[in-house]
Amino acid sequence: MAVTLAELARRFQGRVQGNPDLVIKRVASLDSAGPDDIAFLGDRKYIAKLATTAAGAVILAEAEAAHRTGPALIVENPHLCFARVAQLLHPSPAFKPGAHASAVISPSAHVAASAWVGPHSVVEAGAEIMDDVYIGPGCLVGSGASIGTRSRLVGHVVIGDRCVVGEDCLFHPGAIIGSDGFGFARDRERWQKVPQLGRVIVGNDVEVGANTTIDRGALDDTVIGNGVKLDNLIQIAHNVRIGDNTAIAAFVGIAGSARIGQRCTLGGQVGINGHVEIADDVHVTAQSLVTGSIRQAGVYSSSVKAEPADKWRRNAARLHHLDEMARRLARLEEKLQQHSEESEN
Amino acid sequence: MAVTLAELARRFQGRVQGNPDLVIKRVASLDSAGPDDIAFLGDRKYIAKLATTAAGAVILAEAEAAHRTGPALIVENPHLCFARVAQLLHPSPAFKPGAHASAVISPSAHVAASAWVGPHSVVEAGAEIMDDVYIGPGCLVGSGASIGTRSRLVGHVVIGDRCVVGEDCLFHPGAIIGSDGFGFARDRERWQKVPQLGRVIVGNDVEVGANTTIDRGALDDTVIGNGVKLDNLIQIAHNVRIGDNTAIAAFVGIAGSARIGQRCTLGGQVGINGHVEIADDVHVTAQSLVTGSIRQAGVYSSSVKAEPADKWRRNAARLHHLDEMARRLARLEEKLQQHSEESEN
Amino acid sequence: MAVTLAELARRFQGRVQGNPDLVIKRVASLDSAGPDDIAFLGDRKYIAKLATTAAGAVILAEAEAAHRTGPALIVENPHLCFARVAQLLHPSPAFKPGAHASAVISPSAHVAASAWVGPHSVVEAGAEIMDDVYIGPGCLVGSGASIGTRSRLVGHVVIGDRCVVGEDCLFHPGAIIGSDGFGFARDRERWQKVPQLGRVIVGNDVEVGANTTIDRGALDDTVIGNGVKLDNLIQIAHNVRIGDNTAIAAFVGIAGSARIGQRCTLGGQVGINGHVEIADDVHVTAQSLVTGSIRQAGVYSSSVKAEPADKWRRNAARLHHLDEMARRLARLEEKLQQHSEESEN
């Protein structure tokens, strides 16, 4: 695809600086861009690259415009504009509708005429595949599941029985939607399985990363809101509910029945205890553990940063005596108070 | 399936309160249950729901029985009874024996006549699939592996060469049993692979969550005891041994040759160092790190809970000076002691 | 395969103690070895096993040689020698070249005559599979991807479009190379996807564990150096670069654009923040969080080890008041200083 700088400015509410007829074919980084490419300045600290980049054009904010002598597209939010330009110039690959000969599609499944089912994929009884859905190689869509319009399963994705996926979703390889929740009842020494009978309901415009797992609800459903973005290798337990436009990084584990608000962000390796409720607009930093509900928007943390190990070991050893230290500190305060009183007398 | 309340009471050693001929068709939550459903009260704090639920019947303990005016099944352990009722009313879907036309089964594999091998699954040379085993779509059973009676591979499961799975096991999609252990010998700058020649031995009645990985032993075997329950996205390294009826939550990593006792529980994101031994009946809370052996039953922890980030940052900054603080505290104590002695003289 | 002890000594620069004509067929552990097996002593603390093992021969360092009465192979580095002997005696299973009838190979893909493509695997348009490559069952090699000579995809592996894999690599099941990076631009409440257009470039002699994910670069590439060893369930984000011979344990998450040096080791569950740079020869202990660049070789840590939970809870509670404790300590020091000065006056 190829568009002029003027056309990009028109589509994305920008202002052209320099030649409006410049033809742009691709996006690229400031470092690797060539004359047919458009790059963007994401961070002021790279402003010197504006002088050295071979990019045909650069997307910039007004504040940086004066630093660019060559062609530029001046917009309010360069990162957002860059995303949209990249979407325009690099759309998901087109596909022809139909199904590969090796796909196994139940006669009772409904697959839209405009959808594609790839090689070695399986669509089970009663499943519904809507218009323009792309199902890549080696996927499994369970019985009674449904996949909304324009959603895309890259390949090796599992959507379990009866799960419901909205429109415009994107699932990366190894994503497992609708595995059983981890539910057992104690039976003296043993565990009795509690059958997991709920579903996973995924909203519209959701992205699910590679090898991320979302368990079906025990009785009611696990619910992923619209616009939720999940990185790779996340675990979402049964009956969790995630609010719209929340973004979650890799290795986050959300235990059963937790509720996460809208527009939250959870950093990598964060743990959320079961049954916890987290308000809208809460941000949790990497490796923190949320053990109780968070009612207020804001940033929360229990991250501990690494330092040289010999120094850390001394500090960590003291941590295991911190309660005793606190008591000794209180005793000292008391003693000194006594001394002061005595010396005043 | 449909059973009367009387029949449930008979099977599960309960007492009927109200109409014994009430027909129950499904289990459901107190919130969503209808007149054909049976719910249960899992936590006293929801006791008010007994008055409002539309459930046909509710499973209750004797202590709560008086709070329910409608039909009820009174039992000793409502959660356990509910699990059993749910198993009865919602059995795993039946399957017809045989193999899908697209399955690839080695002529030297043995597949029981009562087993099913699903579409695009592969059963390699010498593998043994016992009676009533269900192998869903897209699974791989490696050469010489064996799968015990009634075990169930939901789909997209890998059981590696020579691994042994017991009876009544359940494997969720993306579970990988028998990947190579992470074993290398240093060779100056480089790493030389140590071939991983052991197996994974999985006991009976084991459940393995989605995308969980269990490595084969280096020389001897990795062993998962009977009744062990593994959540999604767990890593169990080579030569680990896990005792019967231990339950492990998501993102737990157990390093090589560690031994975990019976009836343990490991919370989400717990790390267990290599070669560590953990006694029976040990419980480790979420995100804790076990660096040495634990010889005593009990609860262990190094969990740190998140707080507002500005407050946490001040505390965490001090943590990196805790050894110095401890020394200063000790000096103060000494000084004050001197003062006391001086003032006594 | 079977070799004499003399032949092993010749190949691996060792010295035979005892019968040089002893025939060795397998490697085994000291505990389980029999008369046809060779074991090794990896740790002096097991030296007593030299007297009791039934192993035909044992690989030993010179310092331990006197403790072994039976046949032995005396070498400089027993662990390394054992790795090489095991590689010799237990090579990867041979395969016949070609493709299974159920494999789906694009007419525009190039598959070397000496390579194998297993059942239900898919090789897309323009992909290149080099000499002696083994692609096990259920793999996906995306369009334009290439797999170098002698590399091995055990099964259920995904190599995404245009990704490049070097020679002699080993990929375990569920490894996903080339999933999209987690890149979004804020658009008021919503997230706009930034198309991920880079590749993953994997060097030679790389091992990638089960269910590990490596994201493609956003614009430029994600790069995994030669000899890198990745355990199971690791997440490597877009544009990360990992230096040669670095080894990384399970559940490590490396955020976008981080650079890891050569010969580093990262313990299990370590988190590395985005854009961080880590020097060569840096070692990070389990569960630590690296939030800033590390310029110096050495060991780094923020690991906190578990202790009995009642004790830990008291310490952890104080941790949330550590800043206040530090202030109180400083005030005490000040007061005592005043006292001293007053009493001197």
Image (spheres, coloured by chain):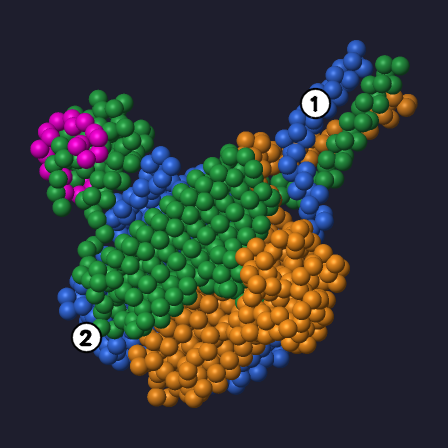
Chain colours: A green, B orange, C blue
Q: Bounds of the magenta span?
A: A9-34
Amino acid tagged 2: Ala
Q: Residue furthest right?
A: B345
Q: Is residue A45 above or below residue C274?
A: above
**Disc on the earlier residue, 2 or 1:** 2
Quadrant assignment, res C45 = bottom right
Task: Please give left or right for residue A205 compared with residue A241 in the image.
Answer: left
Quarter of the figure with the N terminus of chain C: bottom left
Query: Gap between marks 2 and 1, in whole Å?
Result: 79 Å
Residue drawn at x 41%, y 63% is A162
Could you say where residue A105 lies in the image, as x and y percent from the top left?
A: 29, 71
Report the disc number at residue C113: 2
Quadrant assignment, res C160 = bottom left
Quadrant assignment, res B168 = bottom right
Report the disc number at residue C331: 1
Q: Is residue A11 magenta?
A: yes
Q: Is residue C73 above or below residue A85?
A: below
**Could you say whether the residue bearing mark 1 is in a helix, strand or loop?**
helix
Q: Nearer the viewer, residue C14 or C224?
A: C224
Residue drawn at x 70%, y 27% is C329
Amino acid tagged 1: Arg
